Image (cartoon, grey):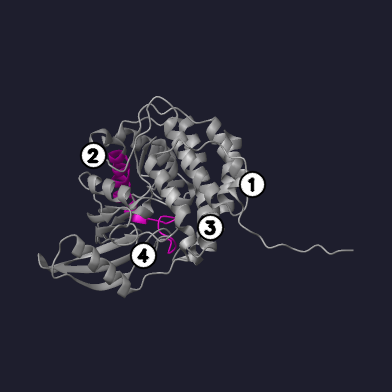
Amino acid sequence: MKEDIAMPMTLASREDVDVWDRSEMEPRIRHILERTVRLRDTGPYRPKSDAEVMAMLTGFFAAKGLEEIAISDVERMSGGASKEQFAFTLNHREDPQGERLVLRMDPLEAIAQTCRGREGEIQAIMGNHMPVAPVRWFDADGDLLGQPAVILGFVRGVTQPSEGGSGGVSGMGGRLGSLIDRLAPQYIDALATTHRFDWSRARLRFFDAPRGGGNQAAIWQVNWWSQVWWDCLVEPVPVVALAERWLRENAPVCDRPMLVHGDLRMGNFMFEEPSGKFTAVLDWELAHIGDFHEDIAWTMQKLFGAWGDDGVFLVSGLLPRDDFVTQYEAASGNRIDPVRLHYYEVLNAYKCAVMDLGQAMRASIASNNHQEVVLTWLGSAGAVFLSHIVQLIRKG
């Protein structure tokens, strides 16, 4: 009798599955996703050395017209699973004293494929409304640096207390202790300020807005992340397909699209110690025009919160859910619709599953990121979000 031979697992093909029409998508997002697929086979990605970073930056600043350029004190920055980041000091003829800056640049693939032009553009604008790291330059498609990047001013601060915090990943389960009373009002204000921003009057070259009065805001997001899933597919997951169908069938109307940050949580806020004063709202790479409920549902995720001593869950480690809703509505003038909030809770769990089980695993398998170990570890979190998707859909 012939023995069965175990065949090695291979990446699934998009041609093997029946897919929905995902053509309705923000044009710049489509460009980024298509570029990712086109370039992924040019890997593996090799982390940049300090000398390579110095050479890249020197050439970039020379192209920008600076003279007598000196790049020094290059230091790789830890953290993050998307961008390769370096701190450095720039001196040139017009600024002999120098400035400490941060380079955020794209590896071939990351846990989220986003646009440095969008990040730099919206962060520069929002610097007029809240504390952010100042945007000095950005190279949206890597025409000068060789890979897309944004260069920011260096901002000092912490993302969790130096003492008494969780000691783990910032913004995930941290305990903020006596700082809560100082941080919570600033956090609510940052959310409200983001959503009140009049994007229609801004010159946004890298953004398009969905139509109000329909479900395009939701469908654009579903198409974005479902396209990522099928482009990165390692192994089919029935719950992910179920979630995509549910999201399409239940897409809610958004009457008035607003600026959505996309990743607002305490881990993306820097503050001073001991004052607790915010110094920067970080990571605008997922920003888009859409439904503000997406931000609210994101920051309410259990992953980003903590449990108080009394056993009450604190949104982003700051406030009980009801208090958070009351204070946000008072500050923003928006009213949170429970049905739309539930929808975006499902969408956000779906996005996280796609990132962890799709993009992170695909980048790791192809060795297209500088943090393969971190991406592989994040893949293990996918089961948590699959379980959450099932619970939410049953609840709805």
Real-space Cα separation, disc 1 to disc 4, in angstroms = 51 Å
**Closer to the N terminus: mark 3 or mark 2?**
2
Spatial CA span between label 4 and label 3: 37 Å
* Quadrant in the picture for residue 206: top left
**Residues rendered magenta in the picture:** 166-194
Quadrant where the image shows the N terminus: bottom right
Query: Which mark identifies residue 16?
Result: 1
Q: Please state which of the two labelled residues, at mark 3 or mark 1, is closer to the viewer.
A: 1
Q: Residue beneath label 2, please?
A: 203
Secondary structure of the residue carrying tag 1 is helix
Badge number at residue 362: 3
Q: Position of residue 71 (x, y in %)?
A: 22, 71
The amino acid type of the residue labelled 1 equals Asp
> Does the magenta segment cover residue 223?
no
Q: Tell me residue 227's x, y (percent).
A: 50, 44
* Residue at 9% in and 64% down: 94
Q: What is the secondary structure assignment of the residue under circle 4?
A: loop
Distance CA(mark 3)–CA(mark 2): 35 Å
Q: Does the magenta stretch include residue 186?
A: yes
Label 4 to label 2: alpha-carbon separation: 42 Å
The quarter holding residue 245 reads: top right
Q: Nearer the viewer, mark 1 or mark 4?
A: 1
Quadrant location, the C terminus: top right
Please tell me how crowded label 3 is: few (under 14), some (14-19), or many (20+) other residues with Cα within 10 Å: many
